[in-house]
Image (cartoon, rainbow, N blue to C red):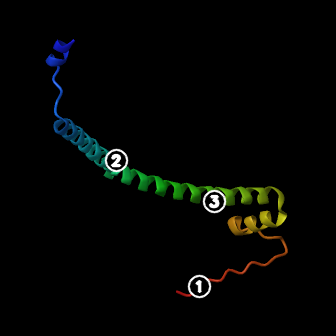
Amino acid sequence: MPKAFADMHVPPALRRWSARFGLALIVAIAIGYLPGQALRKDPRTVKLHTQLDELGVEARELADRNAVLVREIEALRSDVGAIEDRARADLGMVYPDEIVLRVQEAP
């Protein structure tokens, strides 16, 4: 049994603790550096997010315009006043007993 202990090398406490401290320092630097690199935004990502925001705004505008058109369609299907207004404005239609006066704007 004494021979087994004589052949084993046990490093001194200072060297053992300095190795542990060095490894801890390397791990601390890696932990501090890697999240910063992972959180850094790629310029392409920023550009794509900007485009995505612009497309979102455009989609909302189109959805609002579509809602207005749906309301107009429903009005033209059911509201006599809306049908008359559209016929007068777009087609120039009038009742037989009405007089139409066209006024030209001065240049």
Looking at the picture, tell me which residue is in the foreground, 105 or 26: 26
The residue furthest front is 2
Mark 3 = which residue? 64
Give the structural element (helix, strand or loop) at label 1: loop
Mark 1 = which residue? 105
Give the structural element (helix, strand or loop) at label 2: helix
Q: Is residue 13 above or below residue 41?
A: above
**Residue 16 picture quarter:** top left
Q: Is residue 29 left or right of residue 98?
A: left
Give me the C-alpha separation between circle 3 and circle 1. Answer: 34 Å
Q: Position of residue 96 (x, y in %)?
A: 83, 71
Residue at x-position 24% and y-position 38%: 20
Asked if the residue at tag 1 contacts the one at tag 3, i.e. Cβ–Cβ closer than 8 Å, the answer is no
Residue at x-position 26% and y-position 46%: 29
- Mark 2 vs mark 3: which is more N-terminal? 2
**Residue type for callout 2:** Pro
- Mark 1 vs mark 2: which is more N-terminal? 2
Q: Dot 3, crowdedness within 10 Å: few (<14), some or many (≥20)?
A: few
Screen quadrant of the N terminus: top left
Q: Is residue 104 above or below residue 59?
A: below
